[in-house]
Image (tube, rainbow, N blue to C red):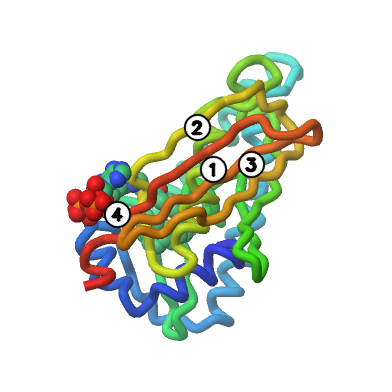
């Protein structure tokens, strides 16, 4: 899990049992310490990177048909090996004995999720939160441009993390204005809390390329009633 999100989730740990139970989110306390977490990170991270590489290579390959068939068989065999022993369902949000969190299946940040860009959220003392990410061929929507749903994923995650920097918040409403196409490549998203109204937190943010803002976002994030009860 990225440092920013880890920091955020650690701050909500005391309320996590109630919140996640109430929202039927899969939540597991694992009997492992941080050194074991580091060991697993070093084991699974490179596997995920290799799968990410495979996804991009699959889209862009121009090798001969015979090689495609050969690789198909190899990939199917690799998936079958991993299937030999599987979790029953999704990964969920887990905590070590020391309270460190890891959401390795998460679509935005998951260390074991090759679909995740992956995002890493940073913040400063002024309350600005940001993430920088390179989105390549697997995130294409309109030709050469980022898929609008992927822009939404980046902004939802960033704005949600920003909203949750004090107390946990779920996305209630996310409004996006796509000002121009977002080119594939290096991007930066920024967000800030603009309003707090009880359990509601309003966050505004942007997604930009080197030429400026491509998407503007406003999110209303809601704290579960149990978190502040
Ligand atoms: C890093 C891993 C994170 C995994 C996430 C797990 C847990 C989150 C915990 C910590 C967060 C940490 C990091 C965050 C990182 C990323 C964030 C991603 C966030 C998501 O990806 S999350 C998935 C999509 N999200 C949902 O799956 C929400 C489904 N939904 C619900 O769970 C309920 O629907 C809820 C809780 C939203 C409200 O339910 P409720 O019963 O508490 O609300 P209630 O009726 O009491 O209203 C109270 C006041 O909110 C207003 N209000 C109500 N609903 C509204 C809406 N939709 N839009 C605008 N305003 C709304 C009312 O108008 C009233 O306002 P007023 O008081 O002014 O009248």
Tag 2 or tag 3, which sits nearer the N-term?
A: 3
Between disc 3 and disc 4, the foreground one is 3
Q: Does residue 105 show up?
A: no
Q: Is mark 2 within 8 Å of ligand 1?
A: no
Q: The residue tagged with tag 4: helix, strand or loop? A: loop
Q: The residue tagged with tag 2: helix, strand or loop? A: strand
**Which residue is drawn at the image coordinates 63% and 27% (left, top)?**
146
Q: Position of residue 134 (x, y in %)?
A: 72, 41
Tag 4 or tag 2, which sits nearer the N-term?
A: 4
Q: Work out how far the residue at label 1 is from the one at label 3, CA to CA, in angstroms.
A: 21 Å
In this view, the residue in front, 50 or 94, is 94
Q: Position of residue 181 (x, y in %)?
A: 66, 22
Residue identified by numbered label 2: 176
Say left or right for 214 vs 104. right
**Which residue is drawn at the image coordinates 64% and 38% (left, top)?**
207
Q: Residues within 10 Å of mark 2 (few under 14, many from 20)?
A: some
Q: The residue tagged with tag 1: helix, strand or loop? A: helix
Between disc 1 and disc 3, the foreground one is 1
Between disc 2 and disc 4, the foreground one is 2
Residue identified by numbered label 4: 88
Q: Height in image: 175 above or below 29?
A: above
Q: Work out how far the residue at label 3 is from the one at label 4, CA to CA, in angstroms.
A: 23 Å
Q: Height in image: 24 above or below 68?
A: below
Residue identified by numbered label 1: 155
**Which numbered marker is on residue 119?**
none
Between disc 2 and disc 1, the foreground one is 2
Tag 4 or tag 3, which sits nearer the N-term?
A: 3
Q: Residues within 10 Å of mark 3 (few under 14, many from 20)?
A: some
**Which residue is drawn at the image coordinates 65% and 61% (left, top)?**
122
């Amino acid at each position: 899990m990225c440092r920013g999100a880890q920091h955020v989730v650690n701050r909500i740990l005391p309320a996590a049992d109630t919140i996640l139970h109430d929202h039927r989110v899969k939540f597991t306390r694992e009997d492992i310490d941080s050194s074991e977490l580091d060991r697993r990170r070093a084991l699974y991270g490179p596997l995920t990177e290799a799968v990410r590489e495979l996804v991009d290579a699959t889209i862009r390959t121009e090798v001969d048909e015979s090689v495609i068939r050969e690789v198909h068989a190899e990939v199917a065999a690799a998936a079958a090996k991993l299937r030999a022993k599987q979790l029953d369902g999704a990964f969920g949000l887990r905590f070590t004995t020391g309270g460190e969190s890891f959401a390795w299946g998460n679509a935005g940040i998951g260390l074991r999720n090759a679909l995740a860009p992956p995002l890493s959220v940073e913040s400063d003392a002024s309350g600005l939160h940001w993430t920088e990410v390179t989105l390549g061929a697997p995130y294409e929507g309109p030709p050469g441009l980022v898929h609008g749903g992927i822009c939404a994923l980046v902004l939802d995650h960033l704005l949600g993390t920003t909203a949750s920097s004090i107390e946990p918040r779920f996305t209630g409403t996310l409004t996006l204005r796509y000002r121009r196409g977002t080119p594939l490549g290096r991007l930066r998203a920024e967000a800030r809390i603009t309003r707090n109204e009880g359990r509601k937190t309003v966050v505004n943010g942007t997604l930009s390329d080197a030429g400026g803002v491509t998407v503007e976002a406003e999110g209303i994030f809601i704290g579960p009633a149990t978190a502040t009860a």
